[in-house]
Image (cartoon, rainbow, N blue to C red):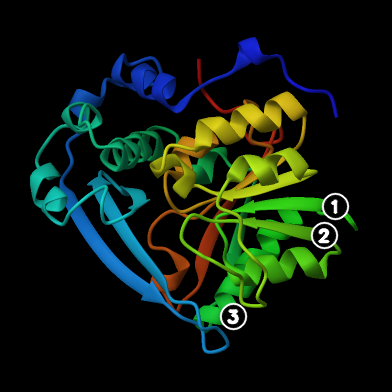
């Protein structure tokens, strides 16, 4: 696959500046944050010894919840009390990266709603947590178009997705800052550059936005000319702006996330260059 010229790169910080300057729509100062929430949630499936600890910041702006998953050292519970009642302009200028990402997501989710800009809306039917997770991760693997014997870097490890990659004949290269091994005892790499250099394709979660590694991932896949599929609860509307700018496919899951609902859930799928409308950006 032909690589993309480096001069066409686009960064998260450039996107934030474009929003602040009103280049993508209305000035963010006209959009108030009417609600702000901090959520701590854990997940552990019966077949696994691994317990996931998830922390989320949610910002309610009009009919959308801007979302960002974060670690405990990045943000404390007081953030939720500090941010409601402010304009999005003020929140976007906060120095804390998870706050910036949630604010960017809130802005873009209002201005460019998923249901109007995605390629396809996929319904995940009501079910148990593991049923919904397996259906979601099968969709992610299908969007990544995994081929037999393809080496797939998985940055942000969830076991059902490891399983989905293997079921399609792919070789999973797991990478995660928190986990030591997969459910099956496979060692999990901490250095993402090691898996990015070996991979034929990449799947990552959008928590790479909140830990500051997303720009690096986009840079590497563009240089190497390999496809990147992103699964996004965090900053799903932010990732949509990188379609045609490094992101090949996106599975967007805005709040309420599948783990918070036993009912049916909607996922919004984007394929590069095939959406109802091209992603907006600089």
Tell me what residue is drawn at x 79 percent, y 67 percent.
166
Q: Secondary structure at mark 3?
A: helix
| Residue 101 against residue 11 in the figure, above or below | below
**What residue would you read off at disc 3?**
131
Image coordinates of residue 150 in percent, x first then y, are 85, 52
Q: How many marks?
A: 3
Residue contact between numbered discs 1 and 2, judged by CB atoms under 8 Å: yes
**Which mark's residue is nearer the viewer, 1 or 3?**
1
Q: Residues within 10 Å of mark 1 (few under 14, many from 20)?
A: some
The answer for how far apart the CA atoms under marks 2 and 3 are is: 22 Å
- Residue 246 occupies quadrant: top right
Q: Secondary structure at mark 1?
A: loop
**What residue would you read off at disc 1?**
150
Q: Is residue 115 left or right of residue 18?
A: right
Q: Is residue 82 left or right of residue 74?
A: left
Which of disc 2 and disc 1 is earlier in sequence?
1
Q: Secondary structure at mark 2?
A: loop
| Residue 14 against residue 235 in the figure, above or below | above
Which of disc 3 and disc 1 is earlier in sequence?
3
**What residue would you read off at disc 2?**
170
| Residue 212 against residue 264 in the figure, above or below | above
Which of disc 3 and disc 2 is earlier in sequence?
3
Q: Is residue 81 left or right of residue 98?
A: left
**Which mark's residue is nearer the viewer, 2 or 3?**
2
Tell me what residue is drawn at x 25 percent, y 25 percent.
28
- Residue 113 occupies quadrant: top left
Image coordinates of residue 277 in percent, x first then y, are 61, 30
The answer for how far apart the CA atoms under marks 1 and 2 are is: 5 Å
């Amino acid at each position: 696959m032909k690589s993309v010229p480096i001069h066409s790169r686009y960064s998260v910080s450039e996107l934030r500046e474009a929003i602040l300057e009103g280049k993508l729509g209305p000035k963010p100062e006209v959009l108030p944050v009417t609600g702000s929430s901090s959520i701590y949630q854990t997940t552990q499936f019966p077949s696994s010894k691994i317990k996931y600890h998830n922390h989320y910041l949610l910002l309610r702006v009009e009919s959308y919840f801007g979302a960002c998953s974060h670690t405990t050292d990045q943000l404390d519970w007081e953030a939720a009390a500090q941010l409601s009642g402010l304009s999005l302009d003020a929140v976007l200028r906060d120095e804390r990266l998870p706050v910036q990402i949630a604010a960017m997501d809130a802005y873009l989710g209002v201005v460019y709603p998923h249901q109007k800009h995605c390629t396809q809306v996929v319904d995940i039917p009501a079910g148990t947590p593991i049923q919904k997770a397996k259906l979601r991760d099968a969709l992610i693997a299908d969007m990544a178009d995994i081929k037999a014997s393809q080496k797939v870097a998985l940055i942000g490890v969830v076991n059902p997705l490891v399983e989905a990659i293997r079921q399609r004949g792919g070789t999973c290269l797991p990478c995660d800052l928190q986990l030591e091994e997969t459910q099956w005892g496979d060692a999990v790499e901490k250095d993402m550059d090691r898996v990015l250099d070996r991979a034929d394709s990449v799947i990552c979660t959008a928590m790479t936005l909140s830990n500051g590694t997303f720009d690096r991932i986009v840079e590497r896949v563009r240089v190497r000319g390999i496809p990147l599929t992103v699964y996004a609860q965090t900053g799903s509307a932010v990732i949509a702006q990188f379609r045609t700018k490094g992101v090949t496919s996106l599975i967007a899951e805005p709040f309420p996330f599948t783990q918070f609902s036993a009912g049916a859930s909607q996922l919004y799928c984007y394929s590069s260059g095939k959406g109802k409308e091209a992603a907006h950006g600089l």
